[in-house]
Image (tube, rainbow, N blue to C red):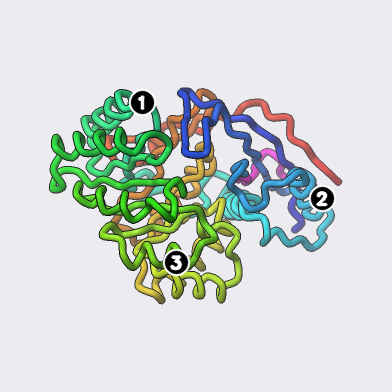
Amino acid sequence: MMLKASYVPYRLDFNFKALTSRGALPYKDTYFIKVWNPDNPDKFGIGECALFRGLSAEDNDDYEVALRQLCRCINNGAKYDVSDRSSIMFGLETAIADYQNGCVRTPFPSDFSKGNGCVTINGLVWMGSVKEMAQRAEAKIESGFRCVKFKVGGQDFEQEFKLLERIRENHPPKNLEIRLDANGAFTKDNALERIKRLSQLVIHSIEQPVLPGQWDLMAHICAESPIPIALDEELIGCRPMTDKHNMLRHIRPAYLILKPALCGGFSGADEWIEAAECHNIGWWATSALESNVGLNAIAQWVAAKTVTMPQGLGTGSLYNNNIASPLCLDGELLKIAIENKWSFPEFKWITTE
């Protein structure tokens, strides 16, 4: 049986001013890919090729050309290789798994996908003014989150420190776990100094304190930091298993942050888990700001594993025009409400022969 494939671009519009250490994000462009049997075109598997402009290793001018070529190869029964394009691999793996499991948006079946389980997630506090971040944090805590992650490094450090200090004074460690994500905003000269100050606040972990590609510096920070260090952007573009082991052996982080759309799709993320376990390194998954199509796939993938730590999957409410789905939040618990249905816009799918 030969499947057919097509794709469509889609622009997700943020419903707030999404500030990061890399600047403001007014929108996020993504792509959907679907596969189907031409004998029954109304049943299709769908995935999200979640390109992250400015971050994905495959962010270049020929991205859509590569996506079009993939669909052409599938449609003509030709061989293809997208192992060097993580976001396309992520979308294709999701679409094929969805198709193989009945075309009902269940790429990874489990009790969770049947609406009988849940995934504990952390609350995410985006950058903003100190007042905005404080309000967002309190709103997350009041809604039931016991683990909250703050984006730091995008503004004055003293203001950020005072904010976190105030949060910790109001919410002791037994009640609230605080995670930090610097997105590489610290430098060689200030990283350890800042981390040591932050450690006074009993911080669970800090993600990617300095920019990736500085293995010696990151190894030094991991060795000296009183706060456990998690690698995030460092994983992007590292594909061969030997390179994964070499990185972890050299840097020796406490945790890995797995974004399947950025680190080789689900197959690549599974390789990172295998490597992490060899080096006694923990991990959790986070989204790369996907729509609900990608978020649903990651949540199901995580739920099919044995996980105990809160996952970074609380991004489903970021957009004005997200894809309507059964995903829902109950406090800090991500669930699938099977009574709610998927609803897609009238996409103009691009088909290539």
Secondary element at image label 3: helix
C-alpha distance separating marks 3 and 1: 36 Å
Residue 123 screen position, x and y as percent = 32, 39
- Residue tagged by mark 1? 129
The residue lying toward the viewer, choosing from 196 and 141, is: 196
Secondary element at image label 1: loop
Q: Which of the two discs, 3 and 1, labels the residue nearer the N terminus?
A: 1
Q: Is residue 281 above or below residue 14?
A: below
Which is in the foreground here, disc 3 or disc 1?
1
- Residue tagged by mark 3? 273
Residue 277 screen position, x and y as percent = 39, 72
- Residue tagged by mark 2? 72
Residue 74 screen position, x and y as percent = 77, 54
Per the image, is 98 magenta?
A: no
Compared across the picture, whether 12 is left or right of 201 comes to: right
Badge 3: few (under 14), some or many (20 or more) residues near its Cα, within 10 Å?
some
Q: Which of the two discs, 1 and 2, labels the residue nearer the N terminus?
A: 2
